[in-house]
Each structure stands twice: as C-alpha cells, then as structure tokens.
C-alpha cells in the first residue's frame, strides 16, 4: 500500500475483498479499529479482520464553487452529482496557515488512502456525524475519482456496538439520512449560487434558560415565559425554566469560566472524551435530543450514579422527557452533548474536569423542571382526590 511501509507479509488479502473505513482523525480511527478488530498498526492505517481503517488528517480536499454553465437546480437531480458537477476539488494548502509543511504530510496520507481505496470493494464513510463530515467525504470521493460502493457509518457515539453496527449496516434510518443529506447539499448549492432560498432545511431549535432571558430586564423588556419561542432566520430559540444540555458554544463558555480552559483546549479535550467513548459528538449546535436518545438516557443516568462528584445528586425516577426534537428536526441535525453510559477510566486531569462538567449538566438537564414538578404534584393531588371520592 505504501512502498516505504508495506503491509505485513502474513496478511493475505484478495483484491477488492477489503472494506476500508475512512475517518477524519487518527484518534477516531484508533477507536474504530479496536472495535472492529483491525489491530495491526501500519503507517497511516490499521489492518485486520477484513478491514482497513485510515484517516484524512482533517479537511484535506477543498471544494470551490465553479459551475461550468448557468446553474440549474432541479429536485429530480441526484444531489451528489449536482455537487460534483458544480464544484472543483483540490488539495488544501495549509502551509502558509500553520507555518510548517503540512501539505507534504497530507499528500503522503492521501496516497495511503488512495491505495487502500483501490483495493476495496466497499468504502465506509466514518467522517464526523454532521454535514461537514459528509461534505469532506464527498470532496475526497470526487477528488480521487475511483467509483466504489459507499456505506455511511453515522457515529454520534463511539461505543463498540454503535461502531460495529454503523460499519456493517450504515445509518439506523437510511431513508431519513438520505433525505437530510439531499436537503443539506441542495441548501449549500442554493447559498453558493446565490439563487432563491426556497429550499429550506430543518430548523435549529435551541433551548434558552430563563436565567439568560432575565438579562432582558436591562433594556426594559418583559421576561419571556417558559415555552415562549423567539424566531430568527433558520433558527428558533425556545425559553425554558430548566437547565439545557450543552452544545459546543455553551461548553466553551462554561469551560472558560469554570475551568479556565481556552477554546482550543476545550475542543481538544472534548474530542478526546468522544474518542474514548464517554460523550456524544461534541461539535454540535443543538442542545436537545430525539426520543431515541432519551430512551438511552434512562439507562445512562443510572450509570452516572457512580460518578464520584455528582452521582449523589441524581433524582429518583425517569429523566425529564422535554429534550425531544421539534418541528422538522431529525437525528442527523445533531443533538446535545450527552454521556454514553460507559464508566470512565484512565482520564487525564483535564479530561476528568471537563467530563465532570458535562456530567453535571446532563444530570441537571434531565432533572424535572420547576413547571414539570408542579404539574406532577398537581396530577398526583388530583389522582388522590379522585381515589378518595370513588
């Protein structure tokens, strides 16, 4: 595969029988490789059990919008082909930006990816679970220009079970994933061509606590009530009287104020926790979750009772159900940062601090809000009253 670092002579492999998993970072590749049994480490990839796992070192192929003719957008066209036709793909030159010859490293890694790609019957797209990850993969696909069957491993969490299912079967709801991806690509094309923005993707819904809303008193505005929505372009903020899950921006703010972490340190540490299977993918704008993730949290909250710092604060009963997707949202828009139900081991001091910060927010977010407690007390009172009457 790589003339300087060929695979082991003991590895027997028929042409096109290989399944290659491509992800963005070596840390993620290491976690995926261990989960699927690709335990033989080489320069630029892992190999074993019929799989190769490799990585791109971030966004190495960039897409430049350059339609060859008057741009026409039709919903009858396959979005991937429209994307390929209207963009040009080339290696990104990082040298001037980072101050060292990263382009040489990228070119060397790209040759490894290309060699594995040529030997593979299936390529698994295990890029980050967001639209940027899918676009990074499409850029790579059209740059290499080697047609092959592609499977998407959508991995908001990196537990062994999730990795194996994603690599072997693809998205849990393929139809929903394809619909989301097509809308996202068409939205990008519309924005790039400055055409009519009649095609709209799903709204981003983010909860805002009333504590934040209280700042409106300074400019003599009334305080929004619980449940009140503020509408903006492609965005809805819903006022809530309880703590929300973290999204990336919220995590950056609290890590800076409570842990004295700069943003780069927070992002790096959060990604380490994601790769160690302890939290969901952290580079998200959402702070809500879908119903399916809420069901997982019923078990995960129980695991958090063993947390040495915040475990004793977990209340009895099932977690709050208010963190559900709303309007046109779906799983592939991303969701708030949650724990995965695995108990942490071998954490650095910084990782432990940030993990505990996230754990506290998860516990607070799934606690009953004041309005929910009031509603539950009222329901119990009415039920008792009805029982006595009967």
Image (cartoon, helix red, strand yellow):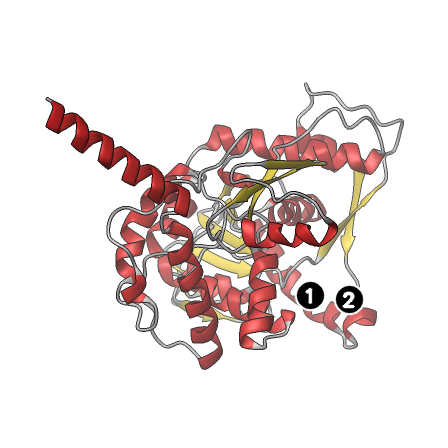
| Numbered mark located on residue 94 in the image | 2
Residue 137, relative to residue 250: is it above or below? above
Residue 338 to residue 165: above or below:
below
Residue plotted at (62% across, 35% down):
203
**Foreground disc of the pair 1, 2:** 2
- In the depicted structure, whether residue 59 falls above or below residue 165: below
The quadrant of the picture occupied by the N terminus is bottom right
Residue at the limit of the structure toward the bottom, as seen here:
349
Residue 179 on image: x %, y %: 57, 29
* Nearest the eye: 332 or 46: 332
Location of residue 198 in the rendering, given as x and y in whole percent from the top left corner: 75, 24
Q: In which quarter of the image is the C terminus?
A: top left
Q: What element carries label 2?
A: loop
Can you tell which quarter of the image residue 38 is in? bottom left
When asked about the image quadrant of residue 338, the answer is bottom left
Residue on which the image places disc 1: 106
Q: Residue at x 60, y 41 (%)?
A: 224
Q: Where is residue 160 in the image (x, y as percent from the top left)?
A: 35, 56
In the depicted view, which residue is nearer to us: 287 or 100?
A: 287
Q: In this view, does 194 lie to the left or right of 287?
A: right
Is residue 242 among the parts visible in the rendering? Answer: yes
State how far apart marks 1 and 2 are (Cα). Answer: 9 Å
Label 1 secondary element: helix
Which residue is at the front of the view, 221 or 275? 221
Count of marks placed on residues: 2
């Amino acid at each position: 595969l790589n003339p300087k670092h060929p695979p082991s002579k003991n590895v027997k492999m028929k042409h096109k029988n290989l399944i290659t998993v491509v992800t963005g970072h070596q840390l993620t590749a290491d976690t995926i490789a261990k989960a699927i049994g690709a335990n033989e480490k080489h320069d630029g990839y892992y190999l074993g059990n019929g799989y190769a796992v490799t990585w791109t070192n971030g966004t190495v192929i960039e897409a430049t919008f350059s339609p060859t003719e008057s741009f026409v957008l039709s919903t009858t066209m396959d979005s991937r082909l429209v994307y390929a036709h209207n963009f040009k793909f080339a290696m990104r030159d990082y040298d001037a930006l980072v101050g060292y010859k990263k382009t040489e490293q990228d070119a060397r890694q790209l040759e490894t990816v290309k060699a594995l790609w040529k030997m593979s019957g299936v390529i698994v797209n295990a890029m980050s679970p967001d639209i940027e990850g899918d676009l990074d993969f499409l850029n790579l696909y059209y740059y290499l220009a080697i047609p092959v069957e592609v499977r998407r491993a959508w991995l908001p969490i990196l537990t062994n079970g999730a990795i194996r299912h994603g690599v072997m079967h693809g998205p849990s709801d393929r139809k929903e994933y394809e619909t989301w991806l097509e809308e996202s690509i068409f939205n990008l094309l519309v924005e790039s061509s400055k055409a009519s923005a009649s095609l709209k993707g799903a709204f981003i819904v983010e909860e805002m606590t009333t504590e934040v809303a209280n700042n409106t008193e300074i400019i003599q505005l009334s305080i929004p009530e619980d449940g009140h929505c503020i509408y903006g372009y492609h965005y809805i903020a819903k006022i809530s009287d309880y703590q929300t899950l973290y999204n990336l921006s919220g995590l950056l703010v609290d890590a800076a104020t409570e842990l004295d972490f700069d943003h780069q340190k927070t992002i790096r540490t959060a990604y380490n926790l994601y790769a160690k299977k302890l939290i969901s993918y952290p580079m998200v704008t959402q702070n809500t979750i879908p119903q399916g993730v809420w069901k997982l949290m019923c078990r995960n909250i129980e695991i958090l009772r063993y947390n040495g710092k915040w475990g004793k604060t977990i209340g009895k009963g099932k977690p709050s159900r208010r963190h559900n997707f709303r309007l046109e949202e779906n799983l592939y828009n991303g969701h708030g940062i949650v724990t995965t139900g695995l108990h942490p081991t071998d954490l650095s001091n910084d990782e432990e601090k940030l993990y505990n910060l996230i754990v506290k927010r998860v516990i607070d977010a799934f606690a009953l809000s004041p309005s929910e407690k009031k509603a539950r007390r009222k329901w119990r009172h009415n039920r008792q009253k009805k029982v006595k009457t009967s």
